[in-house]
Amino acid sequence: MCLSFQNRVVLLGVSGSISAYKACELCSRMVQNGAKVYVAMTESAQKLIGPATFESLSGNPVITGMFEPYTLGPLSHISLSHEANLFIVAPATANIMAKCAHGIADDWISTALLATNAPILWAPAMNPQMYLNPATQANIALLKERGHFFIGPETGKTACGEIGPGRMAEPTNIFEYADILINPTKDFQGKKILITSGPTQEPIDPVRYISNRSSGKMGKALAMEALRRGAKVTVISGPASEPLPYHAEKIFVRTAQEMYEETVKRFPEYDIFIGSAAVADYAIKDPMDEKHKRNGSMHYLELIPNPDIIKKLGEIKKCEQITVGFAAETHRLIEYAQEKLKRKNLDLIIANQVGGENCAFGSDYVYALMITPHSQDDKPELIPKEELTHRIFNRIGEILNNR
């Protein structure tokens, strides 16, 4: 696991929404990723979920009021608000947002919100009519003007039975946004990055298809790293099992031909392309319109080559554009990767071993090394995919700086 919250202090304010239970998952994920989390709860929140739950998850005393025993010091609303790298309010009710917007400080959370210099991330959760009320919308607009960050709410059926905007964003999405805010390296600010991710599926008939074992984990990790570094990110993804980052633009395709068309169409608008998708080399020449029935006889499928996305981009790219590819090989790893780098006019290729114990598909680790036209790593190394993405962007940064 890449501990992206290591040595970071997060204040998590939990206000009185039925979504308070979701904050438990958010707290747990941040702690697992290295954060030191301090949870503060409003009086209403404590009616919905017990402080002991957050104390167990965070490993720290939970702040339940201004005048509780001084476990964290007599001025914790000042000391912790200054120490924090990020302040998250999840769930955020209309009431707590109104307090902050108008400078009201009548409890621990509202007081600390006024005292902190950390980025503030709100995850609103309330009845749809409360959220759409002009007063609430004006308060949100005011907080945004002051540089606060918002995620959600999502639209759907709320606890009161009404359908509309008001559901708190999922903890996974809040965590991803927090990851971006708490790691403020912005060396790719202003860059537009296009990433392909996941497998493709080539239909045999309406039921069956040819595909591969790609999960999309590498594409997701690349998108997250690009977002952390300030880039604008678009991901063109096949039917992967991994959900893509909330703040990336997402385009979903199924076949290699669809991915080819979308990528070639959009590529001229981007500064950097990273082709991490496991694109099928072949497609069925004549997919069947009806499900093929088993009759005991042999059945042959005629395959035709799919268009080569990365090769095409290498042919049409401008001198200022950077293209990055992957070479998944079972043997002769470096030799095949070097040949692919040259043949497809790439600026950087990541050669990764697949098969056997080092199979990268679906794993959080990859056995890989990086090669450019002028340099290469000494030998492959087994590292977490998240760590590899960090190194990839460092190398891309070096390429940009040397131009």
Image (cartoon, rainbow, N blue to C red):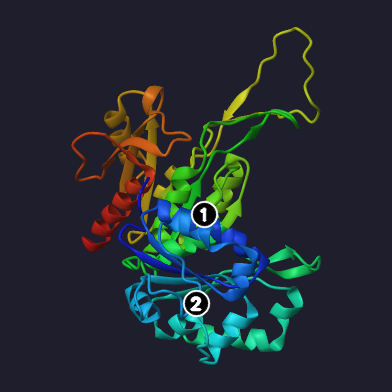
Residue drawn where x is 35% and y is 68% of the image: 184
Left or right of 153: which side holds 118? Answer: left
Q: Secondary structure at mark 2?
A: loop
Q: Earlier in the sequence, mark 2 or mark 1?
A: 2
Can I make out residue 255 in this image?
A: yes
Is 397 placed above or below 196 here?
below
Residue drawn where x is 41% and y is 55% of the image: 31
Q: Amino acid at mark 2?
A: Gly
Left or right of 266: which side holds 328? Answer: left
Q: Position of residue 215 (x, y in %)?
A: 52, 39
Left or right of 223: which side holds 142? Answer: right
Q: Quadrant of the N terminus?
A: top left
Quickly name the residue at label 2.
Answer: 65
Q: Nearer the viewer, residue 176 or 300?
A: 176
Q: Amino acid at mark 1?
A: Val
Q: Nearer the viewer, residue 187 or 314?
A: 187
Is 224 placed above or below 288 here?
below
**Gap between marks 2 and 1, in whole Å?**
44 Å
Q: Label 1: how many residues lie within 10 Å, few (<14), some (14-19) or many (20+)?
A: many
- Residue 235: mark: 1
Q: Label 2: how many residues lie within 10 Å, few (<14), some (14-19) or many (20+)?
A: some
Q: Secondary structure at mark 1?
A: strand
